[in-house]
Image (cartoon, rainbow, N blue to C red):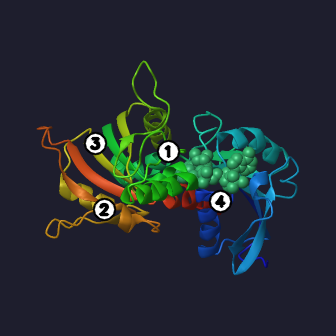
């Protein structure tokens, strides 16, 4: 593999290369012509010997071990919290910068949590690990950042409609399989997600806190959004729901600003937000849909309207859809790597 670009091209490792996010990481590195001296692919022993195509040639997947990071400059981790906790410190000791997709380090005060469109400068303060935020958090708050900078958002309520892909490749397969079984009148026992998925929806499969009633996904979204915005005063509540969509999360958002704000102002700010595309056609009743967002780098935002339940004129409702395997995970991680 030849090196491109300015300076010395890095050796990059993808940990979890065979997963839903890992495969997209290969795609992002390829599409964005990321300069590489070498790309190494790692997964569990189950996948050792498999090949994945990269820049027109097959690349072998190797089993992740303690010596996988010798000579690696950037390690993109996407194999779950357990492997991240075990192997990210190994990678850092070997001299690599880790960009971690799991939730293992996100709320660690010594680890920057980065969305390049919002807080790219935070990545430069890393001590070896940069965390990639929760996908629903990224998709919800990227369109809001220009608003927050002009007229501080003091309160945020979100309701998510989360796709199977957010739970990994096996959950996508479960949605397809259970739908087939349903249509053919066969019984199907879920193996990956806790409830029947075909023609159904359910509260997010993350663990529920028995005291507050919020699940881990909802808690992550609220805590991470505040950390990324660098604003501990923002009040956030979330309801996260798994819907039978294969790919791309959608989110209904209502926010309240410090001062009155109009839908027109919000439309202008969201329309100019980096990484966001306005889809807001009232005449055709055409708004963000997961089907349109799938495979797109941009987060789609629309249905921008006054929240009529707040007579002060400070609250706005909108709807967004974003490919969480891309902007919610792989693309965001590769953008962080580009920044480094
Ligand atoms: N899916 C999303 O939208 C999304 C968004 C943001 C963050 N994330 C995070 O990204 C991570 C991966 O998610 P995913 O959806 O891609 O999951 P996935 O489709 O289940 O893929 C998991 C990957 O991790 C590998 N792996 C599992 N255990 C391992 C081990 N002990 N050692 C080495 N490799 C191991 C798997 O390898 P094998 O093929 O060998 O099993 C596979 O490549 C998770 O931490 C998840 O929370 C996911």
Q: Quadrant of residue 322?
A: bottom left
Q: Between label 2 and label 1, give the one nearer the viewer.
A: 1
> For this rendering, which residue is in front, 205 or 306?
205
- Does the residue at mark 3 contact the one at mark 4 (Cβ under 8 Å)? no
Which residue is denoted by mark 1 in the rendering? 190
Q: Quadrant of residue 255?
A: top left
Task: Pick whichever of labels 3 and 1 is earlier in the sequence.
Answer: 1
Is residue 78 among what the camera can see? no
Which residue is denoted by mark 2 in the rendering? 288
Which residue is denoted by mark 3 in the rendering? 255
Q: Marks 3 and 1, how far apart in space?
A: 36 Å
Q: Quadrant of residue 3?
A: bottom right
Where disc 2 sits, the SS reads loop
Q: Between label 2 and label 4, give the one nearer the viewer.
A: 2
Quadrant location of the N terminus in the rendered image: bottom right
Q: Between label 3 and label 2, give the one nearer the viewer.
A: 2
Q: Where residue 182 sits: x, y (%)?
A: 39, 55
Where disc 1 sits, the SS reads loop
- Does the residue at mark 1 contact the one at mark 4 (Cβ under 8 Å)? no
Task: Pick whichever of labels 2 and 4 is earlier in the sequence.
Answer: 2
> For this rendering, which residue is in front, 150 or 295?
295
View extreme (bottom): residue: 56
Q: Residue at x 49, y 36 (%)?
A: 206
Which residue is denoted by mark 4 in the rendering? 337
Q: Marks 2 and 4, how far apart in space?
A: 28 Å
């Amino acid at each position: 593999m030849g090196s491109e670009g300015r300076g010395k091209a890095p050796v990059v490792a993808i940990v979890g290369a065979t997963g839903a996010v890992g495969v997209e990481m290969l795609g992002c590195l390829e599409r964005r012509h990321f300069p590489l001296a070498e790309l190494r692919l790692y997964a569990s022993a189950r996948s050792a010997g498999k090949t994945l195509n990269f820049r027109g040639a097959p690349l072998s997947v190797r089993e992740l071990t303690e010596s996988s990071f010798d000579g690696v400059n950037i390690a993109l981790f996407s194999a779950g919290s357990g492997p991240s906790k075990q192997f990210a410190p190994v990678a850092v000791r070997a001299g690599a910068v880790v960009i971690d997709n799991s939730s293992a380090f996100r709320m660690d005060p010594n680890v920057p949590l980065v969305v390049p469109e919002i807080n790219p400068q935070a990545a430069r303060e890393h001590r070896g690990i940069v965390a990639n935020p929760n996908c629903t958090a990224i998709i919800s708050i990227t369109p809001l950042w220009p608003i927050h900078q002009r007229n501080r958002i003091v309160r945020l309520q979100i309701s998510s409609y989360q796709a199977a892909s957010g739970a990994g490749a096996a959950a996508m397969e479960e949605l397809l399989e259970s739908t087939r079984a349903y249509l053919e009148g066969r019984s199907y026992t879920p193996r990956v997600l806790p409830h029947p998925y075909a023609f159904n929806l359910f509260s997010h499969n993350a663990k529920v806190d028995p005291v507050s009633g919020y699940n881990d996904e909802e808690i992550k979204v609220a805590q991470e959004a505040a950390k990324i915005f660098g604003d501990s005063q923002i009040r956030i509540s979330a309801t996260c729901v798994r819907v039978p969509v294969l790919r791309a999360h959608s989110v209904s958002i209502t926010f309240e600003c410090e001062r009155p704000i109009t839908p027109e102002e919000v439309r202008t700010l969201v329309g100019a937000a980096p990484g966001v595309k306005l889809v807001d056609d009232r005449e055709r009743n055409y708004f963000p849909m997961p089907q349109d967002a799938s495979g797109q780098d941009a987060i789609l935002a629309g249905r921008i309207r006054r929240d009529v339940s707040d007579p002060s004129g400070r609250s706005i409702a909108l709807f967004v859809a974003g490919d969480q395997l891309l902007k919610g995970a792989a693309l965001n991680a590769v953008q962080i790597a580009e920044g480094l």
